[in-house]
Amino acid sequence: MRVVISGASGLIGTALAESMRADGHEVIALVRRAPQGPFESEWYPAAGEIDQDVVQSADAVVNLAGASIGSKRLTDSYKAVVKQSRVDSTTLIARAYAPRTDGVLISGSAMGYYGARGDEVLSERSEPGDTFLSDIALAWEASAAPAVEAGVRTVFIRSGLVLAPNGGFAARLLPLVKRGLLGGLSGANAWHAWITLHDEVRALRYLIESDHSGPANIIAPKAVRDKELMRALSSVVGKKPGFVVPGWALELAIGPAIEDLMSSQNARPGVLTRLGFTWDHESIEEAAAWVMTEAGHAPPAM
């Protein structure tokens, strides 16, 4: 199989590319610089520049490109950058890939689509929210219209909190958890829809091979409360959970968008369940053990 990936240098893109190459698939990464070999192709989304022949040669295109949400303070100007980067990249890829009607476009989205929903149980059929991240996700998914309208099977992957030992949310928390300094984030009763990076990659590959089109929640079978997540991570390293970080401290570090980033989403993976996908890390305890072990923090001796 020939696969083109945008955002191939990110946490998920890197892991997906490595997994597919290990199984003998040909992976082409879209890069914003001169290619350094035959498995890279130059593109510039803001300028509308892409090699259409490369894109149309792919059996599957996985679109994960977009400016990082967690790495910078979300000022009004940077919010515009976050949104436009996703619209530009998705629109360009969808137009380039539209003639390949026998292919599949796996297009990025996020659980932020649902906004802040408290204890409400969410599925792919739930209505969108009204937060900043909801607005981004709606525009992100709508940008794939050229491919959808051309008849390309298109899957919108609404990814949850990806737990990984080498990046993302969990990796930033590990030093504090290991020292017993963190017991939760503001609103410790909030629900987190989560998945390990290992199962995220497996789910993406499963969807490529499936016949599904439309949204799919890429999350574990059961969401967990914030305090349960911290308790699971702490337990693996033999620590008791520490303190709940207050909202004002998070807002100082992240900005007003903290309400969106810490929204409660009690979601279920209805599509993956219907398709028969099975998780290697189904419980938060299994996920925490995997994250800590892969990060080099072996569980304490019993």
Image (tube, rainbow, N blue to C red):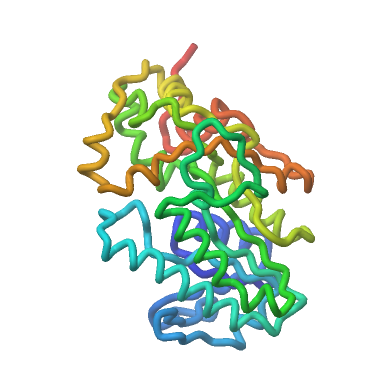
Where is residue 277 shown, x and y percent of the image?
Answer: 74, 44
* Tally of numbered tags: 0
Looking at the image, which is closer to me, 32 or 86? 86
**In the picture shown, does residue 147 fall above or below 243?**
below
Looking at the image, which is closer to me, 195 or 126? 126
**In the picture shown, does residue 251 fall above or below 143?**
above
Residue lying at 25% horizontally and 48% vertically, measured from the top left: 255
The answer to whether residue 226 is left or right of residue 62 is left
Residue lying at 57% horizontally and 34% vertically, measured from the top left: 120
The answer to whether residue 280 is left or right of residue 17 is right
Looking at the image, which is closer to me, 259 or 168? 259
Taking the view exactly as shown, the residue that stands out farthest to the top is 302
- State which quarter of the image contains the N terminus: bottom right
Residue lying at 34% horizontally and 27% vertically, measured from the top left: 177
**In the picture shown, does residue 169 fall above or below 17?**
above
Residue lying at 43% horizontally and 40% vertically, measured from the top left: 263
Where is residue 258 shown, x and y percent of the image?
Answer: 33, 44
The answer to whether residue 151 is left or right of residue 188 is right
Where is residue 70 shown, x and y percent of the image?
Answer: 35, 51
Where is residue 301 shown, x and y percent of the image?
Answer: 46, 15
Looking at the image, which is closer to me, 15 or 124? 124
